[in-house]
Image (spheres, helix red, strand yellow):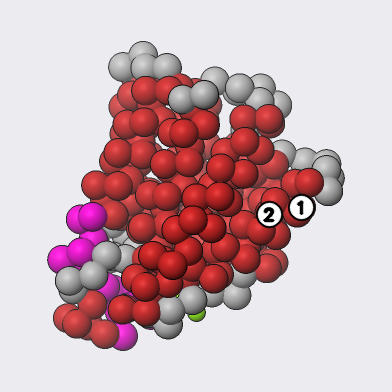
């Protein structure tokens, strides 16, 4: 795999976020300030433009820097730093095992920056299980297609598992116990971005 795969993933993710925008808005309206769909849709539109401009650099790094610069909400710096860390961890050509290691580096960056851990009802509750599923699949000798599908499934399950959780990080934490009963918007968008990875891996 190479940079072209990363570009394809980012474009697919941009499409998924655009398609999921209203759902993310609704989730963030329930336990946040209602801007997660708009934040990510605008951010990924900027990513598309930055990639189309054809600048130098690993596409994931370009995307990460763009999200950090252009998205004001919590999710911009978090996703941006994760993608930037992934891009930095990947050589020009890489295997699915390298990709899994880079993905874990990105997830670690979210935890470090957000001072969050799994169970806090954040994007980490989708990203952490996805990273583990990816590593497990690679360890079992799965190819990219199967590994990405398993990661996407883990992310969807992880996002669904945030519903009963009480938020301990981000705006939703201001609601305390009232944050329970709703899926975390960032976990939902993470599942969309992992679904995009599986879609590109299946091509
Ligand atoms: P904001 O909350 O600033 O309006 P968004 O609505 O775009 O930003 O993103 C909200 C999402 O960001 C949450 O649903 C959660 O998944 C994630 N998030 C917020 N704070 C943190 C944190 N400290 N660590 C990890 N993820 C976080
Ligand atoms: Mg918000
Ligand atoms: Mg906001």
Q: What's the magenta region? A: 160-174
The residue that label 1 is drawn on is: 50
Please determine whether, in this image, residue 27 is positioned above or below residue 85: below
Q: Residue at x 17, y 71 (%)?
A: 181
Number of other residues with Cα within 10 Å of mark 2, as a class: few under 14, some 14 to 19, many 20 or more: many
32 displayed left or right of 179: right
**Mark 1 to mark 2 CA distance (whole Å):** 5 Å
Residue 101 located left or right of residue 90: left
Q: Where is residue 147 shown, x and y percent of the image?
A: 38, 26
Please give the label number shown on residue 47. Answer: 2
Q: Residue furthest top?
A: 141
Q: Residue lying farthest bottom?
A: 174
Residues at circles 1 and 2 in contact by the CB criterion of under 8 Å: yes
- Asked which secondary structure carries label 2, the reply is helix
**Image position, residue 202 (x, y; %):** 46, 25
**Quarter occupied by residue 115:** bottom left
Q: From the top left corner, tell me how far across and down residue 64 is, in percent.
A: 64, 53
Queried whether the magenta region covers residue 167, the answer comes back as yes
Residue 102 visible from this viewpoint: yes
Who is closer to the viewer here, 19 or 163?
19
Mark 1 crowd level (few <14, some 14–19, many ≥20, 10 Å Cα): some
In the image, residue 146 above or below residue 127 = above
Front residue (pair 144, 90): 144
């Amino acid at each position: 795999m190479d940079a072209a795969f990363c570009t394809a993933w980012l474009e697919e993710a941009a499409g998924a976020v655009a398609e999921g925008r209203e759902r993310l808005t609704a989730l963030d309206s329930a336990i946040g300030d209602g801007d997660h769909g708009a934040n990510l849709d605008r951010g990924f539109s900027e990513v598309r433009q930055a990639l189309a401009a054809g600048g130098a650099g690993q596409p994931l790094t370009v995307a990460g820097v763009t999200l950090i610069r252009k998205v004001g909400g919590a999710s911009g710096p978090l996703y941006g730093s994760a993608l930037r860390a992934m891009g930095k961890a990947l050589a020009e050509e890489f295997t699915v095992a390298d990709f899994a290691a880079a993905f874990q580096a990105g997830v670690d960056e979210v935890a470090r920056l957000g001072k969050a851990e799994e169970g806090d009802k954040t994007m980490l509750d989708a990203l952490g299980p996805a990273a583990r599923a990816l590593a497990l699949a690679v360890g079992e000798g799965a190819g990219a297609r199967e590994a990405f599908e398993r990661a996407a499934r883990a992310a969807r399950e992880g996002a669904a598992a945030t519903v009963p959780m009480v938020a301990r990080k981000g705006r939703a934490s201001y609601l305390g116990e009232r944050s329970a009963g709703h899926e975390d918007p960032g976990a939902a968008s993470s599942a969309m971005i992992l679904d995009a990875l599986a879609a590109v891996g299946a091509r």
